[in-house]
Image (cartoon, helix red, strand yellow):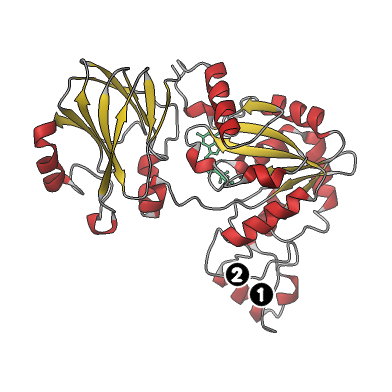
């Protein structure tokens, strides 16, 4: 409509409803500018932070817009940098990404390595990421592991980007929450020369929702918005509960010696029944403070009924939380059972377990990484 105002930085229609959607600015700010009749000069909050603090804030777009964005990638001649979360690969997956890459070169970046226990071997993590990429039809030229938050391997990543981009643009893509914005801010910090370019160029001609960081040779590093993945544990929790499942520091696995007919509850979010196999070690890799309860299988249903939302918390409000859906898993080698963004449980070989996640989520199995 004619009353719609646009951000003069990115062109997004301004809105005061949703903070992580394009064009957001706080209602109070909008009002202030309206009172001063200066609405012609408004920046959205994201562009404001970018201009004044050189800081890139995350933004998400709807699935259809995201598809359009991916389609437009196919027409580019660029290096595509695909950022995934090593703690949550399934939550990092972009459906059909292979068909959108076209003939462009691809660099796979596994972020948040600081969450992995020190006992993890970097090469095994890398191999596993490469296998996963291959499974979904991607052929990255290289795979890099970094921690954007702890600034680990960021300089090396930049070198690789320079080597691979062959004087072309660089597009950074990823689903929301993989740490793409944090990584871009780390890149801005790491490259003082780039930072100078940014402050002097004031981001001319940014297209909708994309942030361009000018590179020395006239090309750009382009940040793109992400999409939210819904087949993830986080999707079933209230925003204020997310902190209970999202690890902030290195995960220390909690070790349980289990025998058949015992059950583990990961708060009220997941459950594992050890059905059959010799006694052995089960290692739980989840947020370090999340409550884990061991009980006899025969008592498990009753315990769950009584304690869901109490001891087994989160979830807090059981009404909102979907019922569990069991999945039978048999292992032929030491394996990690991945819990859709919650973490994973390492189980011995030759066991049969039943894994419960909320309806709609699927547990995946990989060869143990340790
Ligand atoms: P985006 O949606 O992909 O842009 O993700 P953000 O950059 O907003 O990061 C999402 C969350 O992951 C935030 O809570 C970050 O602090 C966290 N995060 C980002 N990078 C890292 C990292 O390297 N290690 C850890 N532990 N957390 C990270």
Q: Is residue 361 left or right of residue 207?
A: left
Q: Residue at x 41, y 52 (%)?
A: 235
Please say if the residues under marks 2 and 1 sit with CB atoms less than 8 Å apart: yes
Kindly identify which numbered label has been placed on residue 33: 1
Q: Is residue 252 left or right of residue 80?
A: left
Q: Identify the image quadrant of the N terminus.
A: bottom right
Q: Relative to 365, does residue 104 appear above or below in the rendering?
A: below
**Quadrant assignment for ligand 1:** top right
Kindly identify which numbered label has been placed on residue 111: none
Q: Residue at x 36, y 50 (%)?
A: 360
Instruction: Give x and y (percent) for residue 203.
Output: 80, 54
Q: How crowded is the residue under tag 1: few (<14 C-alpha within 10 Å), some, or many (20+)?
A: some
Q: CA distance from mark 2 to mark 1?
A: 6 Å
Instruction: Give x and y (percent) for residue 63.
Output: 57, 58
- Res 270 → quadrant: top left
Q: How many circles with numbers are drawn on the protein?
A: 2
């Amino acid at each position: 409509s004619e009353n719609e105002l646009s951000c003069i930085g990115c062109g997004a229609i301004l809105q005061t409803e949703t903070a992580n959607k394009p064009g957001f600015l706080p209602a109070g700010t909008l009002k202030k500018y309206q009172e001063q009749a200066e609405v012609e000069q408004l920046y959205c909050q994201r562009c404001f932070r970018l201009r004044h603090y050189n800081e890139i804030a995350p933004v998400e777009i709807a699935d259809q817009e995201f598809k359009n964005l991916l389609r437009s990638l196919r027409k580019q001649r660029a290096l595509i940098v695909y950022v995934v979360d090593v703690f949550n690969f399934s939550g990092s997956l972009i459906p059909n990404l292979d068909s959108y890459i076209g003939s462009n070169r691809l660099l796979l970046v596994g972020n948040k390595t600081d969450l992995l226990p020190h006992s993890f071997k970097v090469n095994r993590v890398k191999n596993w990421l490469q296998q996963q990429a291959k499974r979904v039809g991607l052929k990255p030229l290289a795979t890099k592991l970094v921690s954007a938050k702890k600034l680990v391997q960021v300089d090396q990543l930049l070198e690789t980007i320079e080597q691979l981009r062959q004087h072309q643009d660089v597009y950074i893509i990823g689903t929301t929450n993989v740490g793409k914005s944090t990584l871009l801010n780390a890149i801005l910090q790491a490259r003082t020369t780039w930072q100078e370019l940014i402050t002097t160029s004031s981001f001319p001609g940014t297209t909708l929702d994309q942030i361009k960081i000018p590179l020395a040779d006239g090309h750009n590093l382009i940040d793109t918005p992400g999409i939210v993945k819904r087949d993830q544990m986080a999707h079933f929790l209230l925003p204020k509960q997310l902190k209970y499942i999202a690890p902030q520091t290195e995960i220390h696995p909690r070790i349980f010696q289990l025998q058949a007919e015992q059950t583990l509850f990961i708060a009220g979010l997941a459950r594992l029944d050890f059905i059959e196999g010799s006694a052995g070690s089960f290692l739980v890799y989840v947020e370090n403070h999340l409550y884990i309860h061991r009980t006899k299988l025969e008592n498990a249903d009753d315990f769950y009924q009584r304690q869901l939302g109490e001891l087994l918390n989160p979830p807090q409000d059981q009404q909102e939380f979907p019922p569990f859906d069991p999945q039978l898993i048999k292992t032929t080698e030491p394996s990690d059972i991945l819990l859709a963004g919650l973490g994973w449980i390492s189980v011995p070989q030759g066991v049969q377990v039943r894994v419960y996640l909320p309806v709609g989520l699927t547990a995946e199995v990989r060869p143990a990484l340790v």
